[in-house]
Amino acid sequence: MTKIRKIAVIVEETRIEAGREIDPPTRKAVAVAVIENPFAGRYVDDLTELMDTGAELGALLGERCVQALGITPQQAESYGKSAMVGENGELEHAAAILHPKLGAPLRKAVEKGAALVPSSKKMGSPGQVLDVPLGHKDAAYVRSHFDGIEVRLNDAPRANEIMVAVAVTDSGRPLPRVGGLTHAEAEGKDGLR
């Protein structure tokens, strides 16, 4: 079972951009779990335990984001994931959490999710910024949803920890105007359009 030291949930709401009122405001939620790294300080071939942790956190953090936004899963428009490993870990530990199993439970939390979940991973120390890339959950070509959110916790990740973040939005960027496929036009059949 995953040892979670801390969970934090943050909602960012943009009401004014470039002097213009945004109505309704654009909103992003990011949920972060700080977990013990069971493989800190040693090389291990089999990372199944971290892969299983990814599945657990995909559901937990995805659901926390949807709840924080006060929306239904169907109303979620974009998502992303990220992990920062403390100094006694390795990047492969972040990859094990983020890639094999986190996506399916996250997709369930936001209903559907045909597109790949944008991700990033890094090594870091307490208080360092973790960037979470964002993309439309059903159609990667929806440019208005290419975005990101950053999160930092003053005491994480410690040397033997991993900070795992999932972000969900209820909209794209405020005032999008770079063209391309729109959210309303997205079909979500192939993850691209």
Image: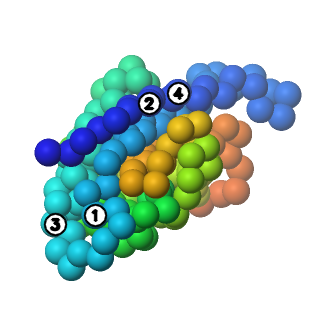
Secondary structure found at label 4: strand
Label 3 or label 1, whichever comes before in sequence order: 1
Name the residue carrying label 1: 39
Q: Residues within 10 Å of mark 2 (few under 14, many from 20)?
A: some
Specify the farthest residue to the right. Answer: 19
Label 2 or label 3, whichever comes before in sequence order: 2
Of badges 3 and 1, the one in the foreground is 1
Q: Residues within 10 Å of mark 1 (few under 14, many from 20)?
A: some
Specify the farthest residue to the bottom. Answer: 45
Tell me the number on the disc at residue 11.
4
Marks 2/4: CA–CA distance = 10 Å
On-image quarter of the N terminus = top left
Q: Nearer the viewer, residue 158 or 138?
A: 158
- State left or right for residue 92 relative to residue 178: left
Secondary structure found at label 2: strand
Q: Residues within 10 Å of mark 3 (few under 14, many from 20)?
A: few
Of badges 4 and 3, the one in the foreground is 3
Answer above or below: position of 108 versus 138: above
Name the residue carrying label 2: 8
